[in-house]
Amino acid sequence: MAMRSRSNDWATETDAGWLGPSVPRTAVVAATLICLSLSAAVPAAVLPDGATLFKQRCASCHSLRQVSGRVQTRLPADRRDFLQRFLRTHHVHDDDEREALVSYLTAEASK
Ligand code: HEC
């Protein structure tokens, strides 16, 4: 069959770089190095904080005590899994944010 997916066409061109012929390889390398050095320099600034996320994203509908109470109805060993699965479809789609909230809420629930 002669069906070719359109989205593959760019990848099958022969002597162009992966960004196409107009982007010099050195520019790609430089941009990559800049990104890497920036992300290494400011890890604390980009990590979401569980307590802050709770205030911003949950507190309009729940108190911390209420959510802690719900988490405490689960066995301690099941709490992380429950929250990971539940929050994926309950307002927290970003993996890093969800991980931060899960850690914060499991810690709060075991106080
Ligand atoms: C728009 C209002 C709203 C927001 C915002 C919200 N929730 Fe909820 N939440 C609800 C309602 C309504 C329920 C009960 C119905 C349900 O289970 O979906 C609930 C249920 C829950 C439960 C109990 C689930 C269970 O099965 O025991 C937990 C835990 C929870 N929310 C945590 C959170 C967290 C953490 C956030 C912030 C990321 C959040 N919620 C944001 C409205 C909200």
Image (cartoon, helix red, strand yellow):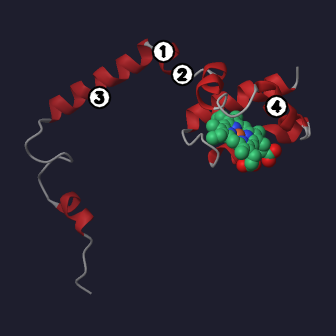
Query: Residue drawn 14% across and 58% down?
Result: 14
Residue 66: give its label.
4
Q: Is mark 2 within 8 Å of ligand 1?
A: no
Most distant residue in the left direction: 22
Residues at discs 3 and 2 in contact (Cβ within 8 Å):
no
* 10 Å crowding of disc 1: few (<14), some (14-19), many (20+): few
* 10 Å crowding of disc 3: few (<14), some (14-19), many (20+): few
Tell me how far mark 2 sits from mark 1, CA to CA: 6 Å
Amino acid carrying label 3: it is: Thr
Most distant residue in the front direction: 60
Tell me how far mark 4 sits from mark 2, CA to CA: 25 Å
Q: Which residue is mark 1?
A: 45
Query: Residue drawn 42% across and 12% down?
Result: 41
User: Between tags 4 and 2, which lies in front?
Assistant: 4
Q: Name the residue nearer the viewer: 84 or 2.
A: 84
Q: Which residue is mark 3?
A: 32
Residues at discs 2 and 1 in contact (Cβ within 8 Å):
yes
Residue 109 screen position, x and y as percent:
85, 27
Nearest to N terminus: mark 4 or mark 2: 2
Specify whether 45 is left or right of 82. Answer: left
Residue 36 screen position, x and y as percent:
36, 23
Q: Secondary structure at mark 2?
A: loop
Residue 111 screen position, x and y as percent:
88, 19
Amino acid carrying label 4: it is: Gln
Q: Is mark 3 within 8 Å of ligand 1?
A: no
User: Between tags 4 and 3, which lies in front?
Assistant: 4
Nearest to N terminus: mark 3 or mark 2: 3
Q: Which residue is mark 2?
A: 47
Nearest to N terminus: mark 1 or mark 4: 1
